[in-house]
Image (cartoon, rainbow, N blue to C red):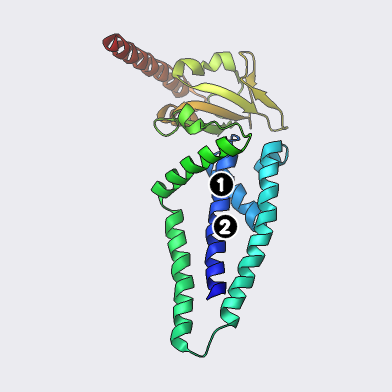
C-alpha cells in the first residue's frame, strides 16, 4: 500500500510541477497552449525540435525553467515507474485485494485526467501560482491575456502572406491597417529576420508572417482578403465599420461624463 500511495503522490506532484512551469512560461510571453506543450515535452523528455524550442533556448528565464523541468521530470518518471513496479511486484494472492489496488490506480488516473480538464481548477491554480511566482521569484509577472483583453473580442494572431493576398507586395503605410482597428506588431521574414513595430515604408512580401492584434472578426476578414477589387472594397468597409465603432465609443464616453 505504501508504494501505491507514493505513486499517487508522484502523479499529483507531476501535474502541479508542469502546471507551475507552464504558467511561468506564459508569464515570459509564450501563449498558453505553447507553454503547456513545451512544459510537458521537457518534463517527459520528448524534446520536440521546433522554432518555439529555439526561442526558449535563447531566452535565459525560459531556459532555466525548462532545465529544471527536465531534471525533475527524469527523477519523477523514474520514481513513478519504480513505485508502479513495486505496486504490482508486491501483489498478494488475495484476488480481491489485487482488484482493489488496480481499481485505485485506474480511478486515480481518471480523476487526475478529469481534474486537469477543469476550467475552474485551472483558473484557481493559475491565481495561486501567479501569486507564488511574484512572491518567491524575480520573474517579471505580466498577465498578457488580461492586459490585451484577449479573453473577449480581441486576439493576437499570425497571418502568413501568400502571393495572391491583398497585403502582398504593399507597404505598411499603404495597407493602412490602423484605421481598420488592427495593429501590426511585427513581421517575421522567411530568412529569419524579425521587424518589430514595422514603419510605414516596410514592404510586406510573400511568405512573411505578420503578428497582428485586433478584433477577431476584423482579423478573419483580413486573412481572407485577396488581391483584387473585392479586397479593396473590404478594406474600405472595414475602415467604415471602425469609424462607426469610434463614434459609438465617443457617445458612451460622453454619457458616462
- Mark 2 vs 1, N-terminal side: 2
**Secondary structure of the residue carrying numbered label 2:** helix
**Secondary structure of the residue carrying numbered label 1:** helix
- Find residue 88 and report its horizontal and vertical position in percent: 57, 80
- Find residue 65 and report its horizontal and vertical position in percent: 66, 44
Disc 2 versus disc 1: distance between alpha carbons?
Answer: 10 Å
- Find residue 57 and report its horizontal and vertical position in percent: 72, 41
Task: Report the residue marked by disc 2.
Answer: 14
Q: Is 61 above or below relative to 70? A: above
Task: Report the residue marked by disc 1.
Answer: 20
| Camera-nearest residue between 255 and 207 | 255
Q: In this image, 206 relative to 221: left or right? A: right
Q: In this image, 193 relative to 219: left or right? A: right
Question: Would you say residue 47 is visible in this rendering?
Answer: no
* Residue that appears at 56% across and 68% down: 6
Quarter location, residue 201: top right
Q: In this image, 167 relative to 215: left or right? A: right
Q: Is 112 above or below relative to 224? A: below
Q: Is 10 above or below relative to 158? A: below
* Residue that appears at 54% across and 63% down: 9
| Camera-nearest residue between 87 and 36 | 87
- Image quadrant holding the C terminus, namely top left
| Camera-nearest residue between 200 and 154 | 154
Amino acid at each position: 500500500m505504501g508504494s501505491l500511495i507514493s505513486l499517487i503522490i508522484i502523479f499529483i506532484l507531476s501535474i502541479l510541477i508542469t502546471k507551475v512551469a507552464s504558467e511561468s512560461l506564459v508569464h515570459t510571453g509564450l501563449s498558453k497552449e505553447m507553454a503547456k506543450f513545451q512544459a510537458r515535452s521537457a518534463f517527459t523528455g520528448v524534446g520536440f525540435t521546433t522554432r518555439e524550442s529555439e526561442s526558449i533556448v535563447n531566452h535565459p528565464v525560459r531556459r532555466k525553467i525548462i532545465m529544471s523541468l527536465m531534471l525533475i521530470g527524469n527523477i519523477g518518471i523514474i520514481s513513478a515507474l519504480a513505485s508502479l513496479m513495486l505496486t504490482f511486484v508486491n501483489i498478494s494472492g488475495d484476488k480481491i485485494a489485487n482488484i482493489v489496488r488496480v481499481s485505485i490506480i485506474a480511478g486515480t488516473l481518471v480523476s487526475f485526467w478529469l481534474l486537469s480538464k477543469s476550467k475552474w481548477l485551472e483558473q484557481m491554480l493559475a491565481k495561486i501560482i501567479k501569486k507564488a511566482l511574484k512572491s518567491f521569484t524575480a520573474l517579471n509577472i505580466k498577465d498578457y491575456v488580461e492586459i490585451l483583453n484577449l479573453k473577449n473580442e480581441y486576439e493576437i494572431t499570425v497571418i502568413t502572406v501568400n502571393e495572391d493576398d491583398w497585403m502582398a507586395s504593399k507597404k505598411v503605410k499603404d495597407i493602412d491597417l490602423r484605421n481598420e482597428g488592427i495593429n501590426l506588431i511585427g513581421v517575421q521574414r522567411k530568412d529569419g529576420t524579425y521587424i518589430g513595430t514595422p514603419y510605414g515604408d516596410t514592404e510586406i512580401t510573400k511568405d512573411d508572417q505578420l503578428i497582428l492584434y485586433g478584433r477577431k472578426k476584423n482579423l478573419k476578414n483580413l486573412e481572407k482578403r485577396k488581391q483584387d477589387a473585392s479586397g479593396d472594397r473590404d478594406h474600405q468597409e472595414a475602415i467604415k465599420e471602425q469609424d462607426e465603432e469610434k463614434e459609438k465609443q465617443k457617445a458612451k464616453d460622453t454619457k458616462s461624463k
